[in-house]
Image (cartoon, rainbow, N blue to C red):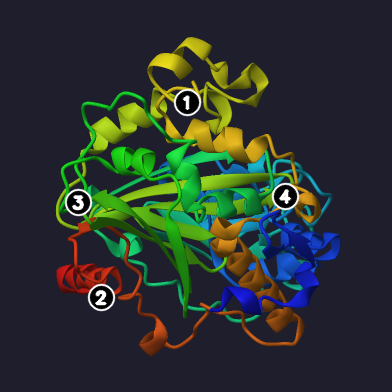
Amino acid sequence: MCWASLPSRYGRRSNGAGGEKPMLSPEDNALLTQTGPGTPGGEMLRRYWHPVALAEELPLGGAPLHVRILGEDLALFRNQYGELGLLGIHCSHRAADLSYARVEDGGLRCLYHGWLYDVHGNCLEQPGEPEGSTFKDKVKHLAYPCVEAGDLILAYMGPGEPPLVPAYEFLTAPEESVFTSKVFSSCNYLQGNEGNIDPVHLSYLHRFLREDERARAVVGGTGSSNSYFTHDVSPTIEVEETFFGLRVFSVRDGGDGASYVRVTNFVYPNMAPNPQGVDGFNINWHVPIDDTHHWKFRVNFKRGGPLDKEQLREDFYSQMGDGWVPRRNLSNRFMQDREEMVATSFIGMGRFFVVHDQYATETQGAIQDRSVEHLGTTDKAIAAHRRLLLQAIRAVQEGDDPPNVTHDPAHNDYEDLICADAIVPAGEDWRASWRKYLKMGAAAR
């Protein structure tokens, strides 16, 4: 992908240093941020599988969940056989809320008049109708396919036969290798998406002035990633298009002629894997609730052995309040501490990266106005990401599948989806070096 080749619809604005960088038009910003039924962006997103809940939220015998995804209110349930169903929330009879329904007889039974629906939206019983009535056979309730994978419940909300569930490693990994969680975010999903592919913010937003005793050294180096982010705040950034989206490279000074190289990814349409050493990665998966809120589903994945899930669970839930909202949040100004800004961290909002990201994305407003921003040289991944999503939207408008959607098992392969952060020794070409980690990841599968 050539940075200079970005299409003219972005507009042009001087960066004050003799260069020009793209800005997004209000019309394209609307295309990217409107996600409801019938909107171009929403129709593109509906061609993919999305997480709608954590599997642990819906145990066998548990109550249905009211979930709102892509602007639709739905009732998610697990019947007594373990089958998952995702139904339109309002009963097809008189519109009572099915998230209150009884889970029985293989489906959901409405509390108002006892109508029973199975996981496919078929109406199985209408107790008030005359014996022998076939009226129930004429009622087809809204239902979306669901699967459980990698401790997540995924749904397909698009037309036609669902594509294959992507064969991401973390969706089929052993339970001890995966820890999942989620966070409620009061902003458009695109803001969360874009935060993941912005390498420069790591030098400021997540900067610690004093190292955590659990900080790990980067592969091949003696310092932590935080130390390298702080040492070099102006990395070289390159972007490479792939079949799944984007691969983003950031290259910083590693000391003594070495380079600190970090490889992250954008995966169509709303997922970002980030490095956790060569043994795995961390996932942020941003799923629209509606245009002004989204779920950030988080996955910690370790390929080479079991995670310390007890520690991860303690670290996460100790920071969380009600409703999947962090205790530090916009309503209390993230409990910012100015003394902490002097002694411990650059932003004074604790050590929980989720809170840092919530500050950055939620304070942009519910839907960021991208027509007035000023993109710099280091924002090339952001601009490329927007361009790819606009292309995906237009592909769907023209009747085609967007990228990273397949019905062919032979094409459902993500060996090239790899993250890495490592020191590349002086004199070694980082472009060739990082591919060692690609091979190491493939060999470990």
User: SS of the residue at dot 4?
Assistant: strand
Instruction: Indicate which disc residue 158 carries.
Output: none
Disc ID at residue 432: 2
Q: Position of residue 389 (x, y in %)?
A: 64, 70
* Number of marks present in the image shown: 4
Instruction: Tell me the mark number nearer the camera, choosing from 3 and 4.
Output: 3
Residue 338: x and y in percent read: 52, 13
- Give the image location of residue 226, x and y in percent: 33, 38
- Residue at 76 percent across and 68 percent down: it is 10
Quarter placement of the C terminus = bottom left
Name the kind of residue labelled 3 in the image: Asp
Q: Reading the chain from its start, which is encountered first: label 1 or label 2?
A: 1
Separation of disc 2 and disc 3 at Cα? Answer: 19 Å
Q: Give the alpha-carbon distance from disc 4 to disc 2, as whole Å.
A: 42 Å
Q: From mark 1 to mark 2, how far is it between C-alphas?
A: 42 Å
- The residue sitting at 31% across, 52% down in the picture is 253
| Residue at image location 49% in from the left, 36% down from the top | 205
Residue 383 left/right relative to 291: left
Q: What element carries label 1?
A: loop
Q: Residues within 10 Å of mark 2 (few under 14, many from 20)?
A: few
- Give the label, 1 or 2, closer to the camera: 2
> Residue under circle 3?
256
CB under 8 Å between discs 4 and 2: no
Residue at numbered disc 4 = 290
* Residue ID for mark 1: 320
